[in-house]
Amino acid sequence: MHVLRMNDIPQNSLHKYVESHTLMRRNFVVLIKLLLGTRWFILENERILCP
């Protein structure tokens, strides 16, 4: 049975995987901030429009 070791994986492919993973997570954080910001903006506008 072949056991997968770290040095069996090419270093650059591992680096690419980590890079894409962090990029995906960053985009996710930005998306959440955007959604929260939009919700806050709508709530603020409603408060201004309907005192």
Image: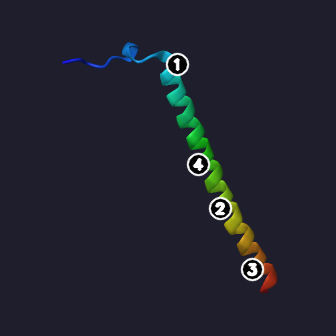
Q: Which residue is mark 4?
A: 28
Q: Which residue is mark 3?
A: 46
Instruction: Say which amino acid is labelled 2.
Output: Leu
Reply above or below: 13 against 39: above
Q: Earlier in the sequence, mark 3 or mark 2?
A: 2
Q: Is residue 4 left or right of residue 30?
A: left
The residue at the point 52 percent across, 29 percent down is 18
User: Quarter of the image holding residue 4?
Assistant: top left
Query: How far is disc 1 from disc 2 in space, using C-alphas?
Result: 36 Å
Numbered mark located on residue 44 in the image: none
At mark 1, the secondary structure is helix
Instruction: Say which amino acid is labelled 3.
Output: Glu
Q: Nearer the viewer, mark 1 or mark 2?
A: 1
Query: How far is disc 3 from disc 2 in space, using C-alphas?
Result: 15 Å
Query: How far is disc 4 from disc 1 in space, using C-alphas?
Result: 24 Å
Numbered mark located on residue 36 in the image: 2
Where, quadrant-wise, is the C terminus in this rendering?
A: bottom right
At mark 3, the secondary structure is helix
Q: Is residue 46 left or right of residue 23?
A: right
Color theme of the render: rainbow
Q: Decide: marks 4, 1 in contact (CB < 8 A)?
A: no
Q: Earlier in the sequence, mark 3 or mark 1?
A: 1
Q: Position of residue 41 (x, y in %)?
A: 74, 68
How would you rate the neighbour count of disc 1 (Cα within 10 Å): few for under 14, some for 14-19, many for 20 or more? few
User: Quarter of the image holding residue 50?
Assistant: bottom right
Q: Earlier in the sequence, mark 3 or mark 4?
A: 4
